[in-house]
Image (cartoon, rainbow, N blue to C red):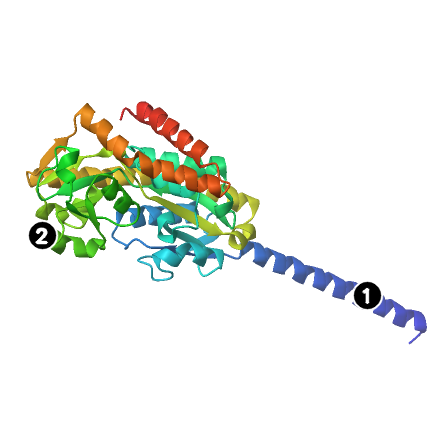
Amino acid sequence: MKWWNVAGLVVVIAVLSAGLSSCRRSEDQEKEKEKVVELSYSIFFPPSHIQCITAEAWAREIEKRTSGKVKVTIYPAGTLTQAPQCYEGVVNGLSDIGMSCFAYTRGRFGLLEGIDLPLGYPSGLVATRVATEMVLKYKPKEVSDVHVLYIHAHGPGILASRKPVYELKDLAGMKVRATGLSSKIVQSLGGTPVAMSQPETYEALQKGVVEATFCPVETLKGWKQGEVINSITDSSVIGYTTAMFVVMNKSAWDRLSPELQEVFTQVSNEWVDKHGQAWDQADEEGMAFINKLQREVIKLSEEEKQQWKDAVKPILDEYITKTAEQGLPGKEFLADIKSLIEKLSTKAGQ
């Protein structure tokens, strides 16, 4: 074989090899594009809870709008990460997405603790909108290690008791089930806080170990505590809440294409109100349960409302002082929350 024939053959083989290699690369790239993004979602609520059900609907909507390019597997009831470890679990990649309460990690979220304070939230929808807007507006450094999808928060905590509380003085010395922030509220109102979990509260009320409990109305049905109390006092004038995060691991977020990220943002924006409405629906069911049991519902007079607000003011002052020492804009943060509550309450007719 002449040398130019050999050279020609080599060139042909090289061209064919390059073509095959290019085809393989194209096939690999296509396969990569078609690859499903699988994400784990840790939720501390049990699967039967309305907030877990709402989160499940969010996940299914993500899958639907991405045409199956994203698959979200939910791990409810803290089966992947327990409630207090959920946030750090997202940061460290133990789960790609997580839902839990900021309050379960006291001290880590210095500025955001202000959302939970007794500021007079009238409903879960208002609390949820306020919480989400405040986080998006202030973009606090304390959540910079995750991608925030959205925030939601329960309706106002109220006082449910074995004997009626018509006035602030009726609370003096009363043993009230409370934990965390609500313990401070009970103390400021003159009561005696007793720390215990929700599962323990029914029997404690039944046996008189505690005489009252601070909780959202939905708890009275969800945990059947309405069966062992005789009245509820509408203390929503100092209604506190508990803000709950839905956050995503930063690396997991960055792995999503811009198109997929846009879907996550759109669906998350829509789900803010869905969670707020779910909280209110649960509260309505709790109130219906109370009415069916014919429990007394006590409304505070305007004079009493002011006394209750004055009583919890030191809690707000303490937050302002503490955040100022940390170099955080706590005073402005609370002022914005109060303004938002008033604005959104008027808009919602609450």
| Local crowd size for mark 1, using a 10 Å CA cut-off: few (<14), some (14–19), many (≥20) | few
Q: Is residue 224 left or right of residue 16?
A: left
Total of numbered circles in the picture? Answer: 2
User: What is the number of the mark on residue 142?
Assistant: none
Q: Is residue 282 left or right of residue 228?
A: right
Residue in the picture at 47% in, 42% down: 325
- Looking at the rendered image, the quarter that the C terminus falls into is top left
- Secondary element at tag 2: loop
- Looking at the rendered image, the quarter that the N terminus falls into is bottom right
| Local crowd size for mark 2, using a 10 Å CA cut-off: few (<14), some (14–19), many (≥20) | few
Residue in the picture at 22% in, 44% down: 215
* Residue 275 at x, y percent in the picture: 33, 41
The residue where tag 2 is placed is 208
User: What is the number of the mark on residue 12?
Assistant: 1
How far is disc 1 from disc 2 in space, using C-alphas? 92 Å
Residue, far bottom: 1
In the depicted structure, whether residue 23 falls above or below residue 51? below
Residue type pointed to by label 1: Val
Whether residue 136 is visible, yes or no, is yes
Q: Is residue 347 left or right of residue 226?
A: right
**Which is more toward the observer, 155 or 120?**
120
Residue type pointed to by label 2: Gly
* Residue 179 at x, y percent in the picture: 26, 50
Residue, far left: 294
* Proximity of marks 1 and 2: CB atoms separated by less than 8 Å: no
In the depicted structure, whether residue 329 falls above or below residue 148? above
Dot in front, 1 or 2: 2
